[in-house]
Image (cartoon, grey):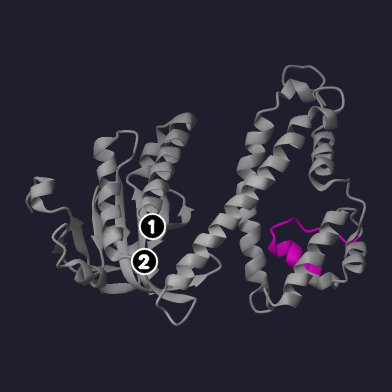
Amino acid sequence: MTADDGKPGLDPSVVIDAITELMLGESPHLRRADVSEQSGVPQDVARARWRALGFPEAEDDDVAFTDADVEALRLTQELVGMGVIDSDTEQAFIRTIGRSFARLAEWQVRAFLGSIEADDLDEGDPAGQLEELQKVVPLGERVQAYVWRRHLVNAATRLLMTDSDDADVAPMCVGFVDIVGYTTRSRHMTRTELTDMVERFEEVTTGLITDHRGRVVKTIGDEVLFELDDTKEAALLALELLDQHLDDDTFPEVRIGLAHGNVLHHMGDVFGPVVNVASRLTSVARPGSAVVDREMAESLRDDDKLRLKRMRRTSVKGYEHLEPWSLKRPRERSGTDD
């Protein structure tokens, strides 16, 4: 194999083998049947779990597994035996873990390998040249374990403080914040400019949602889905997000849609008509504005720190007569009239 500069390069498979051994503690030496036998988990169950995690399919004769895979199956089976994972939610539980860590790994591997000069891997022992990863990975595991435990505390607190009799369904305020003109703007940006804009958007948005005691559910392309318990906090958050673009030109102009009502929580995500309404309201909001649904408007109508105005009913996908309300600051604060 030859590098771009014409010099002999290192076969990527050699580096992959070195990383595999470093991450998993050994080179693959087991087949699917070996893993099933040693873990005590039937092959069809093991295969389903493997696929749910998002790992590529391995043939029966492929030597693709290690003792770490056997241990993971054993631990999963122990959780099943404890009742933490049941047969109805097993696949969803595993898929959620797989997706979460896959996204984290995609970012981390670029950061980790990006810190290693390509020339360092052109010759010599690749495992020895990956010594930096041997230092970084254990530190990363400890930090991830801490963050996970902290989030467990926060999630347990939210759950125990809810007034709902159903742990999975609770009244919430759901919102979407969307970058205005993202598609058009991104066409004319360099990779660095686009990265900087997205990073600034996510940094500020996540920080403000946290400040208002909300939770980022997920990012979806150029928008963020979030939820809060309190409608007033949600409204103040929306106005603060709109103000960011006026005060900071590195933060893009946004539009926001908010709705309130019972929300189904499932595997860290949110579902139901309220989520759909919030999404539709975002699509009808003008650039630099926030729109709320009727239920949320009713709960905020008597708050003198907010100004609400009913907009014309509109038809959007799934909703023929959606009633949006514009959300603004009081006139004396905004300095503008309708």
Q: Amino acid at mark 2?
A: Asp
- The quarter of the picture where residue 15 lies is top right
Query: In the rendering, at what x and y percent does residue 55 appear?
Result: 73, 56
- As drawn, the label of residue 229 is 2
Q: Is residue 171 above or below residue 285?
A: below
Question: Within 10 Å of the Cα at label 2, are there few (<14), some (14-19), or many (20+) other Cα atoms?
Answer: some
Q: Quadrant of the N terminus?
A: top right
The magenta stretch is: 46-60
Q: Is residue 221 above or below residue 32?
A: above
Residue 197 seen in render: yes
Q: Are marks 2 and 1 in contact (CB under 8 Å)?
A: yes
Q: Quick one: label 2 or label 1, which is nearer the N terminus?
A: 1
What residue is rendered at 32% in x and 65% in y? 230
Query: In the rendering, at what x and y percent does residue 160 appear?
Result: 47, 72
Q: Report the number of numbered marks.
A: 2
- As drawn, the label of residue 76 is none
Q: Is residue 170 left or right of residue 115?
A: left
Q: Secondary structure at mark 2?
A: loop
Q: Is residue 149 left or right of residue 121?
A: left
Query: In the rendering, at what x and y percent does residue 294 appear?
Result: 23, 71
Query: Badge 1 is on which residue?
Result: 213
Q: Amino acid at mark 1?
A: Arg
Q: Is residue 284 left or right of residue 310?
A: right
Is residue 165 on the magenta stretch?
no
Query: In the rendering, at what x and y percent does residue 324 appear?
Result: 22, 66
What residue is rendered at 6% in x and 51% in y? 337
What residue is rendered at 22% in x and 70% in y? 299
Is residue 56 on the magenta stretch?
yes
**What is the residue that sits farthest to the bottom in this orientation?**
165
